[in-house]
Amino acid sequence: MRELIVAIDGPSGAGKSTLSRRLAKELGYVNINTGALYRTVALAATRKMVDLTDEAALGRLAREIIIEFVRPETGERVIFDGEDVSEAIRTPEISCLTSRISAYPEVRRALNELQRKLGSQGGVVLEGRDIGTVVFPQAEVKFFLSASAEERGRRRNDELKARGILVELEKTIAAVEARDAADSAREHAPLTQAADAMVIDSTAMSIEEVLQKMVTVVQQRRRLAGLAEPVMELGR
């Protein structure tokens, strides 16, 4: 029997990337950072000067570019065209562009196909905004992470400061709220919570508290699936 598929959805700044990475490491699963896929396409579009209103061209770009995830001792890194773009894809400008291009069906279809290919064998953790509803509705474990816009804005602001990017907190919160509105209102694959997802509001919780709750849920599901032996860390 294959290992489980774990889907983590939620709005921007809810901690999906950090928790998917930590959860995958804890379980010995592979972490597929779907948000990084979209961000990298946005970065590639700006570098290759692709018209951001040309859906067909963006869809072709999403199918053609090669994105790699590597995990050296320093942590998970995103490689595009042989370059580490882990920091470049996390700027406020790329965040805004990502929300725009992710609304295009052609782009979503291309990256959904890639995600399904990467995760079909199980033993994976995927995070995004429609993993449990569109990409892997059959995922055995689904989480929906949430937190107040103010808390998510504060976390995002702290993250930017740590990278030397200074932005007023009020502007960061406003950007989070704008991203929420765009993601929820878009016509194709809007941000929605799967009916069978476990909702975790992390506003007043630490990363460690949320992680422990998620690990417990996954291990319970593994036992129900007949996968009673603990998964060993594989060092991916």
Image: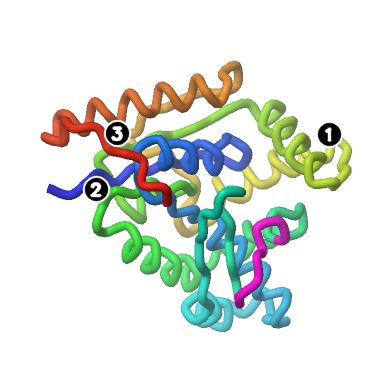
> What is the magenta range?
81-88
Q: How many other residues sit within 10 Å of disc 2, few (<14), some (14-19) or many (≥20)?
A: some
Q: Kindly indicate whether the residue at mark 2 contacts the one at mark 1 (C-beta within 8 angstroms).
A: no
Q: Secondary structure at mark 2?
A: loop
Toward the viewer: 23 or 39?
A: 23
The majority secondary structure of the magenta stretch comes to loop
In the displayed structure, does residue 2 sit left or right of residue 160?
Answer: left
Looking at the image, is 216 positioned above or below residue 197? above
Q: Secondary structure at mark 3?
A: loop
Counting residues from the start of the chain, the first of labels 1 and 2 encountered is 2
Is residue 173 something one can see in this rendering? no
* Amino acid type of the residue that numbered disc 1 sits on in the rendered structure: Leu
Report the residue marked by disc 3.
196
| Place of residue 167 in the rendered image (x, y in percent of width and height, measured from the top left) | 87, 42
If you read the primary sequence from the N terminus, does the residue marked by circle 1 or circle 3 appear first?
Answer: 1
Q: Which residue is mark 1?
A: 169
